Amino acid sequence: MLSKNNLLNTILNNNIDFLEKNDQISKNIIIESINNGTMVLLGNINHKNVKPVLIGQPAKVKVNANIGTSPLICSHKEEMEKLQILEKAGADTYMDLSIGGDLDAIRKDMINSSSLPIGTVPLYAAAKHNADKGRTIEQLDFEEVFDEIEKQAEMGVDFMTIHTGITREAAAYAEKNRILGVVSRGGSMISRWILKNNKENPLFTEFDRIVKIAAKHNVTLSLGDSLRPGACADAGDYPQISEVSHLGIQAKYAFENGVQVMIEGPGHVSLDEVESQIKTIKKLTYNAPLYILGPLVIDNSPGYDHISGAIGAAAAVMAGADFLCYLTPAEHLTLPNKEDVYNGVMASKIAAMAGDTALKRKYALDMQNNMSKMRQKLDWQGMKEYALDKDIIDKRRESHKDKAECAMCGEFCSVKLQHNN
Amino acid sequence: MLSKNNLLNTILNNNIDFLEKNDQISKNIIIESINNGTMVLLGNINHKNVKPVLIGQPAKVKVNANIGTSPLICSHKEEMEKLQILEKAGADTYMDLSIGGDLDAIRKDMINSSSLPIGTVPLYAAAKHNADKGRTIEQLDFEEVFDEIEKQAEMGVDFMTIHTGITREAAAYAEKNRILGVVSRGGSMISRWILKNNKENPLFTEFDRIVKIAAKHNVTLSLGDSLRPGACADAGDYPQISEVSHLGIQAKYAFENGVQVMIEGPGHVSLDEVESQIKTIKKLTYNAPLYILGPLVIDNSPGYDHISGAIGAAAAVMAGADFLCYLTPAEHLTLPNKEDVYNGVMASKIAAMAGDTALKRKYALDMQNNMSKMRQKLDWQGMKEYALDKDIIDKRRESHKDKAECAMCGEFCSVKLQHNN
């Protein structure tokens, strides 16, 4: 049915040459993969300056960076600077997760300032407006959530996280049986609403309304994992798999109604369980593109969760994950600052490249081999062409930039020794 | 034969209670594993203040940090500061790889200043003294290498990298057929010597001399991987496997003569090849403890190689690797500074913990679960008990330390929402 989505076809046709070149895969593979729902093209028809992005193997694995204000650290200006930084670092998309300040103004500014596809969680805006009225989360009126989804779709948001799979039963089970209950920000809001009101999740029961809005603007739905594990011990349990099962059924319904869908994934997952997690999720969700947050392979690395996340993400890509949401050194501790944003993107780009290299994608192997050839020549300018961070080579070599070799080994450089053959 | 090593037995008996408690494994497993060569106890009888360390699964996976001067960045004082930093960060051992300044003075100072086991590469000192005399590497007199090994054993060095497995045939093949030839610093020296002099590697042909010195002081031999791949494309090729095969035969000879042995491993290895690499190496080397440098799963992450290395190391631990040599953000670019040393240790500790968690080691699971329980309580003091970096929590929370939640979500904290149940 996706082939009958006229908006999608327009955007696809307008960009197919660029996409083919950028992702180094054929038009036929792109079109076939989109039509069978294993690939999505991020690009809302209302986002005038968007440069659409393909998500779904065998397209290159992409990286998303989350920015946005929080109630405690709230600067419109600084978030706009983070947007510039994440673009410079090489993120493919970003999400505005603002929950402080003038949310509409921030979002509008971002959409106008960047050609990267933007994602949001419309629930956050609805929850903030609800809180601004002095109401608790269980007093949230879900009509305002649906209105927010529609408004943001009209503004040009390209993909939206919507927590459609969490049910009353699974939420209750999670809060009772897990070490860490419900750790998704949006998921915990809905969980609270469900359990306090003793009602089913309206985003679950009225999923068709969301599909209709998405179809109107070619918004890609990113079905949120409210019940993702927030502790390795909670991974793969009943609440998680229950939710994933619902997401799969919803994904199928969305495809059949001409709407593109991604699935969001864990979370905290021990490294030995990453492959089975990813394969189970992909299977249950009809191989829809999988958009993962981590997985963090340990729980006790606050301050360095971009590294724990990169370990899990690389393994997950090898098992089939398609799209990496970055984690920054600030995760679990505070809102990421500008340096965190840069380092988070870099760590995720390493994981994506590690995965694509492991999958023997030609573009990735070419990058590795060209880098190594430049290294063999001690050609530092050449290395900059292929390094994930082009600036860091000069920066770290500043004190000895006149030398052919690096300052670790100096005259005892192994490569230099071979040059003296 | 290791059970007949009296020095080893003395050190083992003097420390068995501490080791049992520290590694959370039984005395019987420790003794049996050491006797069959799958575990080593680092501790030279001449290193008076050493706190011996067990290497080899099921002992906890350990982390080594390399420090030491280079010809271009050479400060005895700063290397001593790095020693303090790596201890603070939680490294289990360190290697002094100095190749600039007064090597004996630096090494002596380090041995006296720290109770961590110290490793060295005696070839470096011999090569430096050779260069100081105005000689090229092919003029190196290997008698000076043997003398240096003996001298350093007497000084108390606990483990030594010795490049015993590289042969004339394999070196020639590597230099001719690889993208990146020989990238090990010591290995490239020997490769140059072999090929220029058209002679076999004396450390290969006279391995028994090294074993005799090691036996005298309970120095653990760390058989060096001169031919480790320096590019993902070079991994698993003939030179690498040829050398590993020799190291296995030498390991067996050393065991049979009462000497403890570790094997050094790659290098640059694509993530899909890490498991087979590690299993092949362990098999060919009679399951001697495997001490790995990375593996780096991509070639093009200069500035962030501690992350690429952590990805490979975590996967390698799951496949059987026992001991992680850290990589720092400075790798391939310059000598690590103090901040690099700290970050390098942290990245390796994450990889070790990820591996031990994946292997379901009780101590690791306890750390994860206790961390998650503290997180569920928003108990920041409690989290510090279980976090790999205890200082970073307060540091990152400084601006909002009076709040129960973190500044990423503020009042919308998912955990806090659940507290309002």
Image (cartoon, coloured by chain):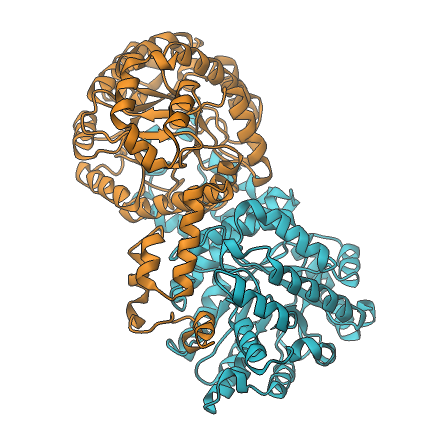
Chain colours: A cyan, B orange
The foreground one among A346 and A269 is A269
Up/down of A140 relative to A278, above or below: below
Up/down of B398 relative to B245, above or below: below
The foreground one among B198 and A196 is A196
Q: Is residue A330 visible?
A: no
Q: How many marks?
A: 0
In the rendering, at what x and y percent does residue A42 appear? 66, 68
Q: Which residue is depicted at the point 71% across and 58% down?
A: A284
Is B364 on the left or on the right of B400, as rendered? right
Up/down of A185 relative to A37, above or below: below
Please identify the residue farthest to the bottom as the structure is shown: A133
Q: Which residue is depicted at the point 39% across and 66% down?
A: B377
In the rendering, at what x and y percent does residue A169 appear? 63, 70
Q: Is residue B281 visible?
A: yes
Q: For residue A281, what is the image quadrant? A: bottom right
In the rendering, at what x and y percent does residue A195 appear? 56, 77
Is B317 on the left or on the right of A3, as rendered? left
